[in-house]
Amino acid sequence: MVHIICIHTTLGHIKLLSLSMKIGDKVFCINDTKGKHNTNLKYPKWIKRGEIYTIRNIGNNRVLLEEIKSPTWGGNKLEGPFEPGFNIHRFRVKFMVS
């Protein structure tokens, strides 16, 4: 299980947001904006705001989703190629599994 505390600022107000996510949880996308590094080569299929997804793996503030599988990418000598995940802050938990 991953516990993340986020600090969001809006118009000078600070809001703490706690995210608890684990494999199997249903999450919904709140941010599908593509950045300049989110190319179609890395992510041939992109997430959609408002859609519900299932977490299949979590690591380094990234989630892998059951519904979207991307090709492996880059890597280094220690870890080897990896599947790029989506930033965990793009999602909120819809249904938690126990």
Image (cartoon, rainbow, N blue to C red):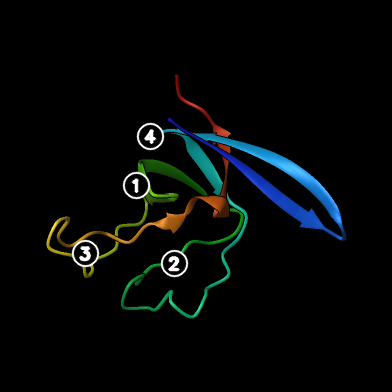
User: Between disc 2 and disc 4, whose residue precedes?
Assistant: 4
Q: Which amino acid does label 3 sit on?
A: Thr
Answer left or right for 45 relative to 7: left
Q: Which residue is drawn at 34% across and 47% down?
A: 66
Q: Name the residue under label 1.
A: 66
Answer left or right for 95 relative to 11: left
Q: Mark 4 points at which residue?
A: 23
Cα–Cα span, label 2 and label 4: 20 Å
Image quadrant holding the C terminus, namely top left
Cα–Cα span, label 4 and label 1: 10 Å
Q: Position of residue 40 (x, y in %)?
A: 37, 78
Dot 2 lies on which element? loop
Q: Residue 46 carries which label?
A: 2
Q: In this view, does 72 lie above or below 95?
A: below
CB contact under 8 Å: marks 3 and 4: no
Q: Residue at x 14, y 56 (%)?
A: 78
Q: Local crowd at mark 2 within 10 Å, few (<14), some, or many (≥20)? A: some
Dot 3 lies on which element? loop
| Viewer-side residue, 94 vs 63 | 63
